[in-house]
Image (cartoon, helix red, strand yellow):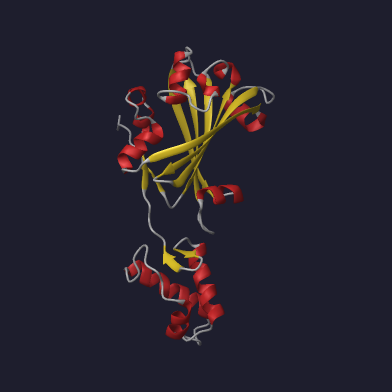
């Protein structure tokens, strides 16, 4: 029962109690919370109070609401993104590059859909790729799925001087992907840089990733450099923060 003399709004007291029970394991990931009627009786409050309390937990990303089924404790789906070796030449030639390496480590079945288009670079891409803003770039949009669940959105931009006449401008780039095609065209990869951040998703991203209100996304902007330091590609990657763990390893020396 809530303490009406505490000065803390009733819905926040209910939310705190449910949060504590979830943390203690009384409600495990995937469990359905008691019905709204049961919670009203248990806490001695009104239905609007219960709804406000549940909305607090939804905003915090602790629970999800499924229409017609109820409110469930969010399951933790930990997809590990492996360290730099996932982008190595050896990994690519063994068909273990990037997302495929994540799939092998996580034991999920990877699938994806791709669209390809061209556009002018714009100011941001031009700055990263060290080209003029009106330079034409090839854009590859990819939706990545793990066991059918969308877990990653990826948009690559490459100056067309590096992609023209190659399979990079096709939906299917062929064995070992874009980086293999770049190297076949004489652009030997020398290094990668990744810039990691977090933010709230745009409406389009939230819809595509099927994230609940209050769930942030992880962002990674990866830049691939040629051996002589020329930027070849920028890749904007967006992932639901509750589904991914970023793991990095490097030598102490």
Residue at (50, 29) in percent of width and height: 223
Looking at the rendered image, the quarter that the C terminus falls into is top left
The spot of residue 4 in percent (x, y) is 50, 87
Q: State whether residue 18 is above or below residue 83.
A: below
Q: State whether residue 229 is above or below residue 151.
A: above
**174 or 75, nearer to the observer:** 174
Residue at (61, 24) in percent of width and height: 137
Tell me if I can see residue 169 in this picture. Answer: yes
Q: State whether residue 149 is above or below residue 171.
A: below
The spot of residue 188 in percent (x, y) is 44, 16
Residue at (35, 39) in percent of width and height: 103
* 110 sits left or right of 142 in the view: left
- Asked where in the image residue 164 lies, by quadrant, the reply is top right
Looking at the rendered image, the quarter that the N terminus falls into is bottom left
Q: State whether residue 190 is above or below residue 8.
A: above
* 120 sits left or right of 71 in the view: right
Residue at the extreme front = 68
The spot of residue 79 in percent (x, y) is 37, 46
- Asked where in the image residue 80 lies, by quadrant, the reply is top left
- Asked where in the image residue 98 lies, by quadrant, the reply is top left
Residue at (32, 68) in percent of width and height: 25
**94 or 242, nearer to the observer:** 94
Tell me if I can see residue 8 in this picture. Answer: no
The spot of residue 138 in percent (x, y) is 59, 25
């Amino acid at each position: 029962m809530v303490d009406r003399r505490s000065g803390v709004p009733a819905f926040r007291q209910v939310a705190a109690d449910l949060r504590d029970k979830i943390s203690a394991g009384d409600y495990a990931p995937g469990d359905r919370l008691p019905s709204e009627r049961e919670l009203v009786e248990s806490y001695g409050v009104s239905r609007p109070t219960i709804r406000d309390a549940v909305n607090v937990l939804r905003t915090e990303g602790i629970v999800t609401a499924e229409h017609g089924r109820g409110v469930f404790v969010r399951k933790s789906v930990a997809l590990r993104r492996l360290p730099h070796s996932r982008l190595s030449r050896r990994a690519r030639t063994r068909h273990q590059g990037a997302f495929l390496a994540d799939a092998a480590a996580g034991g999920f079945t990877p699938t994806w859909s791709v669209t390809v288009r061209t556009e002018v670079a714009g100011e941001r891409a031009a700055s990263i790729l060290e080209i003029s803003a009106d330079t034409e770039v090839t854009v590859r949009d990819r939706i990545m799925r793990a066991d059918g669940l969308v877990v990653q959105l990826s948009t690559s931009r490459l100056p067309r001087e590096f992609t023209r006449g190659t399979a990079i401008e096709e939906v299917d780039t062929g064995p070992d992907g874009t980086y293999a095609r770049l190297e076949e065209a004489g652009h030997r990869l020398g290094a990668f840089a990744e810039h990691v951040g977090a933010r709230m998703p745009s409406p389009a991203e939230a819809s595509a990733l099927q994230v609940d209100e209050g769930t942030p996304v992880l962002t990674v902007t990866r830049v691939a450099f040629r051996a002589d330091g020329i930027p070849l590609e920028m890749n904007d990657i967006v992932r639901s923060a509750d589904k991914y763990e970023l793991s990095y390893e490097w030598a102490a020396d």
